């Protein structure tokens, strides 16, 4: 029997640099790898969406739509893939349906093929309209399960959610493990359960981060259970809070009943390209190599460091243990949302408030909205007492309908507001940029003509730093003699640690 | 059915720092972790042998026997484990049998429990005497298979070697993958094959490095195939050229048919201990995070960098590709030895010689010895033409007997020579130190009284470096103005890169 071919999604151009270097990679550091990526034989190339749009206009003075068009041109043979936050698009609020449709239509027009649609709360109603819009333009709508662990989250629950996504027309199901929590056994059970319940021909894509060091095994188990496509990052853009290395996946499957059909020569060239690029962005990298704390604490690393800096800002850096103990309570009161952006920030900040000011004495606006249903529904019931507090503090009514159903049509208003901005070029894509990032867009549109800027270091800077840093290292060891000119006289000064 | 318990060998105290930081960790940086290691529930604690002995006397002015006794005292409930290079003991030549017996006897006397006995060429005759000596003192003799990939190395061959080791009285079999070459399918096949051939109750320990990023999956497959014990390193001493993280192994098995029974609280304290220690030895660390090149090149990373520096020293740094192409030919001519210390250096250096001076125009003494049988037998036949060249160059005869059979009794001579050394304390262990490292021992014995030295950085040094390195980073960006007092007068000086 010939081995079954497993598809691979390469995430180097999107999630890898988002996870490893705060989404700071400039397009110019990617273009030279595109020809090899295009010929390596990936099932798809994740290259857009997530935080890349925000980062483009906020840090890189780069038009995200131009980036998309460039990828389309440089990778004519590849499925381009994006991560789309359902009704939130790439922004941080719910958008009215017509804005969602416009965004999907323009993305498809500019070259996007596969839309991975997710919602932080796993509320299918927040994904439905975006998925319908993708299908309307004839592109691949991928429904997403955000994986988390809680007393309420079960294999059966995830299988049921997959069914809801399929009913909404999902062409494939993504099992998305953004916190590296997906252990081998549940990976196997969920994939197998979906296949057995809805048919072996349901396409399942599995996305894991590598933070806990265990998820390459989870990918193996998912593949054994029937997963069709898995996500990896080329080795030079892998590991830590990022993803498992693409070449390791290839090596893992050698000799088994599975294979990848990837072109190893192309992979090695892609690897070498990014091995040269990665050091430029070192200042944005976290030091995490492997961290399994999340299995016991249930608190993702990024959320923990957020809470720590909030506490320090209040001069209460020593109270992190209390906050860590508070998080599970707040999470349970909120109905056990997965802790990912934005729910991780919302729950974490409320836990900090609870410890500093007394439990639920003060609610953040976002936490009140979460409790009142304005982000959608979670798996668990929300604590009615806390819902009452939210109502009392905000005077807003709890809702049960889809949050976007409360919104008035807003496209014309967005067009009008965008039109008033310096540098607005009259396009729908500029309107969308304004819609998603109203406070950042004006500055970006005004400065767009100056062209992209690269926040990575130049080779010269890296070299200079290496030199002076090794000088610094030496300075600690023993005396150094300098010549110093002062007032026209030359002096010899010897410096030594006291 | 209750899950099967998998034993774990913690390698933090030996192989982890050998692989990550050139074996430089001082005993004083380990002692505070020992109580937790002792209570964590490991099957064994690898803490001695390999390169630690050499490093103790060469770099740390530390008596390795005192280190062993300290571990014995601090970890009374643990099986202490060492890596022993068969007839080479911990040195770089073959020793006469009585020296081997003395070494094993003294190691047992000072606290060693489990002896992992290996030979770089997998020649059972080089392991036999050491294993017999271990059994004679009533300790655990573990026979070792060094895993490599070649046209001659097959699953069947490894299974056969396991049988030879069991016939020699091995209480357990170690499958040792020092180059992270062991992929999941062969891991499964070899372990299953050994169990099916020799019985399910044959204990199999699996040791993998993590360099290629794939071997935690190999451990999973080995466990599914019946492996009893696996080797890992606590996460803060893991990954890169080291090993898979202990906590990730625990997480990997949760919910499966296997479990580890390790005490997670103890693991976290061990982790935190070494997380604080590791930065002290940063200057000894390699930058390798993951490297899958070895699957195609068959050349371990350490061997490659050795060859590169040899070439550079000859002003021929641009000829590395030729040397890389030469390695497989030299390896085949030598009968396909696994490429590990010392065979990797011997083959690599000869490949460099071949490229620089013409194929086999000049043989190194070591390569000639390898070709003439003085290191033992490999799986493959040696190229008779190259054997003839070795004979012609060295005038030594090829041998087929066990190399140590040619040696005269040498213990009394070693005692006499050691007795003449400054600082010799009259003990057998001092004689053994001299026997294994005759050029290093004299200096060590003479300076032993000065006590151990720590080559790691102090917290103060680390702090000073962090400060001056970030100053250095700033200095590159632009001019800095200092106030400088000199001869009682204050001046303003602006410094800028020329």
Image (cartoon, coloured by chain):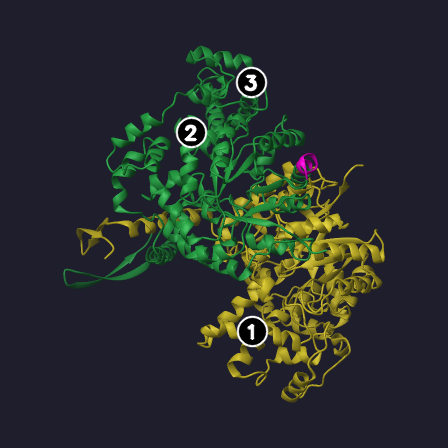
Chain colours: A yellow, B green
Q: Is residue B337 above or below residue A39?
A: above
* SS assignment at label 1: helix
Pinpoint the chain carrying mark 1. A
Marks 2 and 3, the one that precedes in the sequence: 2
Q: Secondary structure at mark 2?
A: helix
Disc 1 and disc 2: Cα gap in Å? 56 Å
- Indicate whether B244 appears above or below B126: below
Q: Residue B168 at x, y = what percent?
A: 56, 30
Q: Which residue is mark 2?
A: B310
Q: Which residue is mark 3?
A: B382
Query: In terms of image quadrants, where is residue B256?
Result: bottom right
State the residue at coordinates (72%, 77%): A381
Q: Is residue B196 magenta?
A: yes
- Given the image, what chain letter belongs to the residue carrying mark 2? B
* Callout 1–callout 2 Cβ contact below 8 Å: no
Numbered range of the magenta stretch: B193-199
Element at label 3: loop
């Amino acid at each position: 029997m010939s081995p079954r071919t497993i598809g691979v999604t390469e995430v180097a151009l999107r999630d890898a640099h988002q996870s490893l270097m705060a989404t700071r990679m400039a397009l110019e550091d990617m273009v030279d790898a595109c020809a090899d990526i295009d010929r390596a034989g990936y099932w798809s190339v994740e290259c857009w969406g997530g935080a890349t749009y925000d980062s483009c206009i906020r840090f890189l003075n780069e038009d995200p739509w131009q980036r998309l068009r460039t990828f389309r041109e440089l990778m004519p043979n590849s499925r381009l893939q994006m991560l789309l936050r359902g009704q939130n698009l790439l922004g941080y609020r719910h958008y009215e349906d017509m804005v969602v449709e416009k965004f999907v239509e323009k993305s498809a027009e500019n070259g996007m093929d596969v839309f991975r649609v997710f919602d932080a709360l796993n509320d299918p109603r927040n994904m439905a309209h975006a998925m319908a819009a993708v299908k309307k333009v004839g592109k691949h709508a991928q429904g997403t399960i955000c994986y988390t662990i809680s007393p309420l989250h079960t294999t059966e629950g995830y299988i049921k959610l997959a069914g809801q996504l399929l009913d909404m027309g999902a062409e494939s199901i993504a099992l998305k493990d953004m916190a590296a929590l997906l252990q081998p056994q549940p990976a196997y059970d969920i994939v197998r359960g979906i296949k057995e319940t809805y048919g072996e021909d349901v396409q399942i894509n599995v996305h894991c981060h590598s933070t806990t060091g265990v998820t390459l095994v989870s990918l193996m188990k998912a593949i054994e259970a029937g997963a069709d496509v898995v996500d990896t990052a080329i080795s030079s853009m892998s590991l830590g809070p990022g993803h498992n290395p693409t070449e390791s996946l290839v090596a893992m499957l050698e000799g088994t009943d599975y294979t990848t059909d990837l072109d190893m020569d192309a992979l090695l060239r892609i690897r070498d390209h990014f091995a040269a690029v990665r050091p430029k962005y070192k200042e944005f990298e976290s030091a995490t190599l492997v961290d399994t704390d999340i299995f016991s604490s249930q608190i993702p690393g990024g959320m923990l460091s957020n809470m720590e800096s909030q506490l320090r800002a209040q001069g209460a850096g020593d109270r992190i243990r209390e906050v860590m103990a508070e998080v599970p309570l707040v999470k349970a009161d909120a109905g056990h949302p997965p802790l990912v952006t934005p729910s991780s920030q919302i729950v974490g900040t409320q836990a900090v408030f609870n410890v500093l000011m007394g439990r639920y004495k003060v609610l953040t606006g976002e936490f009140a909205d979460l409790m009142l249903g304005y982000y959608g529904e979670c798996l668990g019931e929300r604590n009615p007492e806390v819902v009452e507090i939210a109502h009392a503090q905000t005077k807003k009514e709890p809702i049960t309908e889809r949050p976007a159903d409360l919104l008035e049509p807003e496209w014309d208003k967005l067009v009008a507001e965008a039109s008033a901005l310096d540098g607005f070029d009259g396009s729908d894509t500029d309107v969308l940029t304004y819609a998603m990032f109203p406070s950042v867009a004006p500055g970006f549109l005004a400065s767009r003509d100056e062209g992209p800027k690269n926040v990575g270091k130049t080779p010269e800077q890296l070299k200079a730093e290496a030199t002076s840093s090794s000088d610094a290292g030496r300075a600690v060891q023993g005396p150094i003699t300098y010549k110093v000119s002062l007032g026209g006289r030359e002096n010899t000064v010897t410096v030594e640690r006291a």
